[in-house]
Image (tube, rainbow, N blue to C red):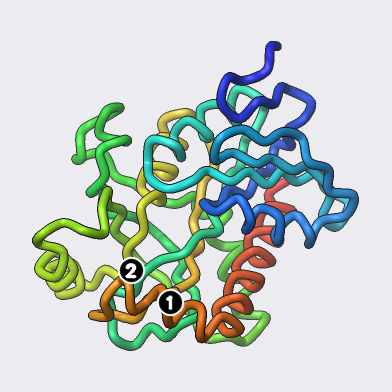
Amino acid sequence: MMKQPHICVESGQVAAQVIVCGEPDRANRIAALLDNAELMAENREYRVFTGQYQGKPITVCSTGIGSPSMIIAVEELKQCGATDIVRVGSAGALQSNIKLGELVVAEAAVRDEGGSKAYVSAAYPAYSSFGLLGGIHGYLSAENVRYHSGAVRSHDSFYTDEEDQLCERWSAKGVLGADMETSALLTVGRLRGLNVASILNNVVLYQQDVQQGVAQYVDENQAMMAGETLAAKAALHALVNAA
């Protein structure tokens, strides 16, 4: 098989079990949790490592921001042999009880992004694989940490003119948080026969301005870095037990 055109890896360089994340530098931090992690390729927003965790091969791939780049990664990882993909991402809270650095386990996602709609109408559900969810819940419960589990919303822009109203609408429906990639992973992954899940680290408090939230992200970096590490370890636990 030739190298994939965007993630620039081929079969044999990608494990069956994969963590995806948005930020390339987060891929570095997750790869640091692996044994013998090796940089396989780097192109555009995609940075790909493969190593071992508890003796099992694991790949880590960054996907950039938004559903189109996530979908490209999912399609090309599948071509390279991936069977299980967990997103370790960040989100903004849509509920006031979710603190910075607390985790949101996405059982399902509102499909408010356009990438997955290019595949199938919004009537098709975006939902996580129960086996991977069980592994994530089991790890977090054993760690005795506070976390949240339920539906999230994936969207295409932070900066629409109706952003406050959109957030209030989905908050009132009980949606826990918002990101830009989860529903694309869950939808296209399911359509391609993959096991998929998403675990998100809260980096913006509900009803906090996005720019203010980014500034606070820097100020409260320690709590959110701890959340990111916890999310990565939960994902690794779930993937190792799925293997």
Between circles 1 and 2, the one closer to the viewer is 2
- Find numbered disc 2 in the image and state the secondary structure of the residue it sits on: strand
Query: What type is the residue that disc 2 sits on?
Result: Gly
- Find numbered disc 1 in the image and state the secondary structure of the residue it sits on: strand
- Residue 145 at x, y percent in the picture: 58, 85
Query: What type is the residue that disc 1 sits on?
Result: His
Q: Which residue bears the numbered disc 1? A: 148
Quarter where residue 162 is shown: bottom left
200 w.r.t. 102: above or below: above
Asked if one can make out residue 116 in the rendered structure from this viewpoint, the answer is yes
Asked if one can make out residue 193 in the rendered structure from this viewpoint, the answer is no
- Residue 43 at x, y percent in the picture: 61, 33
Q: Residue 215 versus residue 207: which sits nearer the camera? A: 215
Q: Residue at x 78, y 42 (%)?
A: 50
- What label does residue 177 carry, if any? 2
Mark 2 burial class by Cα count in 10 Å: few <14, some 14-19, many 20+: many
Mark 1 burial class by Cα count in 10 Å: few <14, some 14-19, many 20+: some
Q: Residue 34 versus residue 47: which sits nearer the camera? A: 47
- Residue 72 at x, y percent in the picture: 48, 30
Q: Residue at x 43, y 77 (%)?
A: 148
